């Protein structure tokens, strides 16, 4: 069990580093806007930081779920917390957690704009 935890931890660290450096090349489509941003080191640092940590969060969520929730099968029953943990793990492992997090404010803004507005008297 200890060896499996170390192996998953090392793979998670390596994949997080990989996504930190390569997620922009994988997920960001070239456009004049992106090309202009690529000239700034601060943009690259932000992209690396965001993609590395979101991948690491996904790997940590998967690690926690597998080794601390699922494997000790004594009395395990699936709960809503587990669903959220699995979704975060899947998004982080696949590299989509940064995009998902960046779309939350946009989605909430769209929902708020659909709400009926109060009429002023």
Image (cartoon, rainbow, N blue to C red):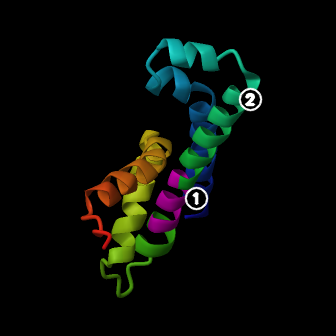
Location of the N terminus (image quadrant):
bottom right
Q: Nearer the viewer, residue 64 or 91?
A: 91
Q: Quadrant of residue 35?
A: top right
Q: Which type of secondary structure does the marked residue at label 1 adopt? A: helix
How many numbered callouts? Answer: 2
Q: Looking at the image, is 6 positioned above or below residue 45?
A: below
> Horizontal and vertical percent for residue 39?
69, 15
Is residue 18 found left or right of 44 in the rendered image? left
Reading the image, the residue beneath label 2 is 42
Mark 2 falls on what kind of element?
helix
Give the x, y percent position of residue 6: 63, 54
Residue 65, by quadrant, is bottom left
Label drawn at residue 75 = none
Residue shown at 44%/74% (left/top)? Answer: 69
Which residue bears the numbered disc 1?
A: 5
Q: Is residue 61 above or below residue 27?
A: below
Residue beneath the point at 39% across and 85% down: 74
Q: Residue 105, percent across and down?
A: 45, 52
The part of the chain drawn in magenta is 58-65
Q: Position of residue 14 (x, y in %)?
A: 62, 38
Is the residue under label 2 in contact with that under label 1 (CB below 8 Å)? no
Determine the residue positioned at 42% across, 41% down: 94
Q: In the image, 121: left or right of 15?
A: left
Q: Which residue occupies 29% across, 64% down? A: 117
């Amino acid at each position: 069990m200890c060896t499996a935890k170390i192996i998953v931890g090392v793979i998670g660290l390596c994949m997080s580093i990989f996504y930190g450096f390569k997620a922009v090349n994988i997920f960001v489509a070239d456009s004049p806007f992106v090309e202009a941003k690529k000239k700034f080191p601060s943009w690259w640092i932000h992209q690396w930081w965001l993609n590395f940590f979101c991948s690491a969060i996904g790997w940590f969520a998967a690690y926690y779920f597998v080794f601390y929730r699922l494997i000790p099968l004594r009395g395990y029953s699936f709960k809503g917390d587990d669903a959220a943990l699995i979704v975060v793990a899947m998004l982080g492992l696949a590299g989509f957690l940064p995009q998902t997090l960046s779309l939350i404010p946009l989605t909430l803004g769209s929902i708020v704009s659909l709400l009926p507005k109060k009429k002023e008297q």
